[in-house]
Amino acid sequence: MSSIPLLEGKNIHFQYGDEVIFDDFNFRIDKGDRVVLKGDSGSGKTTLFRLVLGFESLQHGDILFKGNSLKDPKTIRELRKNSAWLPQDLNIGTGSVNEVILFPFTFQAHKKSKPHQSKIKSTLLDLGLNPDEILQKSYSDLSTGQRQRVGLAISVMLNQPFILLDEPTSALDRESKSKAADLLLNQDERTVLSTSHDPFWVDRCDTVIDLSKRS
Amino acid sequence: MDIIQLSWFQLSIAFISLLIPAAILGYYKTGLNSKMLIATVRMTLQLIFVGYYLEYLFELDNAWINLTWIMVMVIVADFATIDRSELSRKKELLIPVFAATFLGIVLINFFFLELVIQLPELLEAQYAIPITGMVLGNCLRSNVIGINDFYYSLKENRERFQFFLSCGASRSEALYPFFQTALKKSANPTLASMATIGLVSLPGMMTGQILSGSSPMTAIQYQIMIMLAIFSGTILSVYLAIKLCNRTVFFENDMLDESILKN
């Protein structure tokens, strides 16, 4: 265990209106950890993602990324440059699937790592999608399962050191789950923070944080 | 060819034509007749006021007074843009939209009045006021479409915007697709009218010029110029309005301050 954790929550308090989601909650995630958050609906799994990514602000306490507070916008940007998040609603782009996949690679942070078409095709194939059929299709016409695979493919190709996945296998078949887990969890350097109700995924992670038991 | 002067009595006959829409809208219980009445009264009174004011303005033809009048038009357009875009009247929006519209109008006026028409006096009332009015009216329409689409689409697709940010996009990179759509939507009405002008419709300015005795060729030259001014002006003002508003309506963590939205 390194001395400075990748991510550390200290006495965090967060509430929406009168509804308290986190009260004096602490957590620690080290580099290379594969963490899965468990808990009932409304237990704060997605909220924790949003807090970590700086989309919501804490009322009390602090979250540190590599020892620096996320209260500082510079730290938020630094974290985001090193992360990739797959949201549960999968509303991640418009246009053709190819355009949706390539759009993040127009960002300054990823311009140099724009993947070749061969890499895109092989990643899609790994996740059980036929690239020749799907790449020119409109993203909005895809099924939930297909969208999830496209989102996972983007997460794989961005090759970020810290990825956040919200229910990454909820719409996948057994074979695709296994491939997704191989692609995303089998890298020692990568830290994964995920939410999942899927025992297959939970078993492949090494740390479980049960949010329903935190109080 | 002299223009036939309309008497106020003749003009009042024109209002009889409203009986047709009133009957149709009334039959289908659209509830629009009272709105039609208010809009007609407002339109008539506003134009009578402007008519008197412009006569006075043309007589004086003082650059500072003309500039003040343009400022008044821009301020009215500013409030109308915010209201019709269904945004809150907050200084974070009013100031940037005013600045964007004013800057857009100044640049377009300077280009067309100084370089194209080559007026001896830049703010000569006979040219500056009607051209500003036409460009401004269209800027207002485009700004409403563009600004409304941009901020409401950002709210509806909040997770998409956040997904881009979470993948390392800067705020402007993450906003790029929203900007693209807003620009397309605001440009489309003007592009459509440019594509059909003369075939489907004779525009108001050209009709007015012909009615007041100008040759059709002079009228179309001015019409072509005004269409170019409108298109350039609208795109410039939508671009500037969104760019300038974006400097004030986001929190430090790149989240939109959704209190600017009325709905």
Image (cartoon, rainbow, N blue to C red):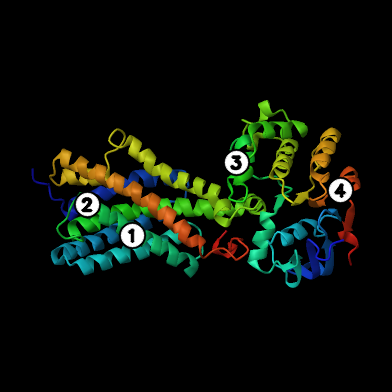
Q: Residues within 10 Å of mark 4 (few under 14, many from 20)?
A: some
Q: Is residue B218 visible?
A: yes
Relative image position of residue A155 (x, y in whole percent): 72, 44
Q: CA distance from mark 1 to mark 2?
A: 36 Å
Q: CA distance from mark 1 to mark 3?
A: 43 Å
Which numbered mark, 1 or 2, is in the foreground of this view? 2
The answer to whether dots 1 and 2 both sit on one chain is: yes
Disc 1 marks which residue?
Answer: B42
Disc 4 marks which residue?
Answer: A197
Identify the subunit bearing mark 4.
A
Determine the residue positioned at 40% across, 43% down: B189
Quadrant, the N terminus of chain A: bottom right
Q: Is residue A119 left or right of residue A182?
A: left
Which three-letter amino acid code belongs to the residue tagged 2? Leu
Give the mark, 1 or 2, whose residue is nearer the N terminus: 1
The answer to whether dots 2 and 3 both sit on one chain is: no
Determine the image quadrant of residue A130.
top right
Disc 3 marks which residue?
Answer: A94
Relative image position of residue A143 (x, y in whole percent): 71, 35
The answer to whether dots 4 and 1 both sit on one chain is: no
Res. A99 mark: none
At mark 1, the secondary structure is: helix
Res. B115 mark: 2
Q: CA distance from mark 4 to mark 2?
A: 68 Å
Residues at circles 4 and 1 in contact by the CB criterion of under 8 Å:
no
Q: CA distance from mark 4 to mark 3?
A: 29 Å
At mark 2, the secondary structure is: helix
